Amino acid sequence: MRSLLFALLIVNLTLSAQADEVSFAKDVWPILRQHCWSCHSGDKPQGALRLDAETHLRKGGESGPIIVPGKPDESSLIEQVSGDKPAMPPKQPPIGAAKVAILRRWIEAGAKIDSMPVDAGATVKIPATYDYAPSITSVAYHPDGLRVACACRSEVVIVSLVDETPPIRLATESDLVTFVEFSPDGKLLAAAGGTPAQFGELTIFDVAKKQPVLKRRLSSDTLFRGGFSPDGKHVALGSAEGAVYLVPVEARGNVRRLELHSDWCVDVAWTVDGTKLITAGRDKTTKVASVESGELLRTVDTALERINAVVADGNLAVSAGLARGMTGYTLNVALQNVEVTGSGNGARPVSRRDQYVRAFEAPPGEVLDLAVSGDRKLLAAAGRFGDIRVFTLADQRRTGLVTGVAAPVFAIALNRDGTQLVVGGKSGKLDVYELPAGKLAKSLTPVPVKAVTQAAAR
Ligand code: HEC
């Protein structure tokens, strides 16, 4: 057995020694794609450097060419990834000596680009007509209450609720859009998502112009839900890295990254005064962080199972997930004795939990989304069960029930005065219900889907 392994090893070594010609497509591209592509691709790459197309690779970035064929020591590509503390990729582990060696050998041998892989610079293809209605992963009301935005795979669709205006389809470069929301003034529409293990992306559209005004690749993995700050100047987003991204809507502002969760941070809510963020994680925790300092103020709860959604009212935050419970937290009590500006104090274990917890009637299954009405009076919960539950925030009482809903529901939103509820999920239908009656007022598929023939339907 051992000798066989040994023989294989030797064959392997000889093979790789023979193949000292480094291939861009086979050897170099996988490194760039894994470690660099998230920031150095697309329309607005970091450092004005795109690594996903041959002409761009040759042209280099802000400071000119990054590759001098035959001379790795003079190539800034190598300089950026070498040394004790390599500059690239920033805030991530270095790519390692073995990969640097491959890049060096490739440059030494002339930096030839044998072929550009098909996924290089890939922009997702959005079908004109879908074979099947794609799931709806996020929904949001425009502040005017007359329009709704929803996320369908790689695109965002704005649908009119009041007339027959055709839906407005807005493309993103994300494989999957996980979050949509209109800015408080209704002029902008944020869409976040990404491509797993490659990049997270926020696109902000000008609603009137129907065009993107900002595209930012932020992380090396998908971004999740979050929200606009009350002043409309920032978008906070959870990420598969566990960090919360605070992204200025102005293209020039600096992105902040708050390290809060040890597993995916799936949702973020702002307090009404815009000073704190409530975050929910697959690490089963619900946390409160200070926007100003970026620090964790308190882990207000640890559940038995993952948390999927969080919302915040003036002084009440509510989170829910897989464990059959929806829990409210009275923030001023939960944060007593927490020094908002101090450090180190916030991570203390939770005490007095019973004093600040407000329990809601337990939903019958996993909650996937929560929504609060614009006037902050009602809270709705939906998920892997066939109804939607509506509660009054002030006293945590259930005051409404919408039945006969196609499960699972991935996304819900309430209009300003809580008289209407919009629902999206696996069915691919956007359903609008009237509250408190729970009557289905409208049901439509936001994107064109191939007509199903009678025969196929049977
Ligand atoms: C998280 C985002 C991010 C990732 C990932 C990343 N970079 Fe960068 N890169 C930047 C930013 C921002 C700049 C411009 C500012 C600076 O030079 O620090 C930059 C600049 C550069 C430059 C200089 C460009 C110029 O002309 O000034 C090179 C070269 C570079 N990056 C190479 C890489 C390589 C190679 C990788 C992968 C191993 C990588 N980067 C990964 C963000 C990133």
Image (cartoon, helix red, strand yellow):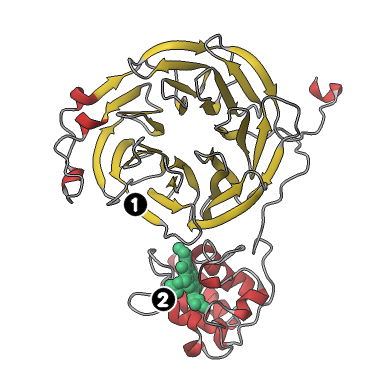
Q: Callout 2: 10 Å neighbours few (<14), some, many (20+)?
A: few
Q: Measured from the top left, where is residue 457 in percent x and y?
A: 80, 22
In whole angstroms, how far apart are the C-alphas of marks 2 and 1?
29 Å
Q: Measured from the top left, where is residue 147 in percent x and y?
A: 63, 31
**Quarter of the rendering containing residue 289:** top left
Q: Amino acid at mark 1?
A: Leu
Q: Is 113 placed left or right of 437 in the picture?
A: right
Q: Measured from the top left, where is residue 235 in percent x and y?
A: 45, 47
* 452 in relation to 25, above or below: above
* 138 in relation to 125, above or below: above
**Quadrant for the C terminus in the image:** top right
Q: Secondary structure at mark 1?
A: strand
Chain-order first, disc 2 or disc 1: 2
Q: Amino acid at mark 2?
A: Ala
Q: Give me the residue at 63% from left, 80% from top.
A: 58
**Quadrant for the N terminus in the image:** bottom left
Which residue matches tag 1? 258
Q: Is 142 placed left or right of 255 in the picture?
A: right
Residue 198 visible here: no
Q: Secondary structure at mark 2?
A: helix
Q: Measured from the top left, where is residue 324 in percent x and y?
A: 38, 21
Tally of numbered discs:
2
Residue 249 visible here: yes
Q: Give me the residue at 44% from left, 78% from top.
A: 80
Q: Nearer the viewer, residue 85 or 101?
A: 85
**Quarter of the rendering containing residue 231:** top left
Task: Say whether mark 2 is within 8 Å of ligand 1.
Answer: no
Q: Nearer the viewer, residue 238 or 240?
A: 238
Q: Give me the residue at 76% from left, 27% from top.
A: 164
Which residue matches tag 2? 97
Q: Nearer the viewer, mark 2 or mark 1?
A: 1
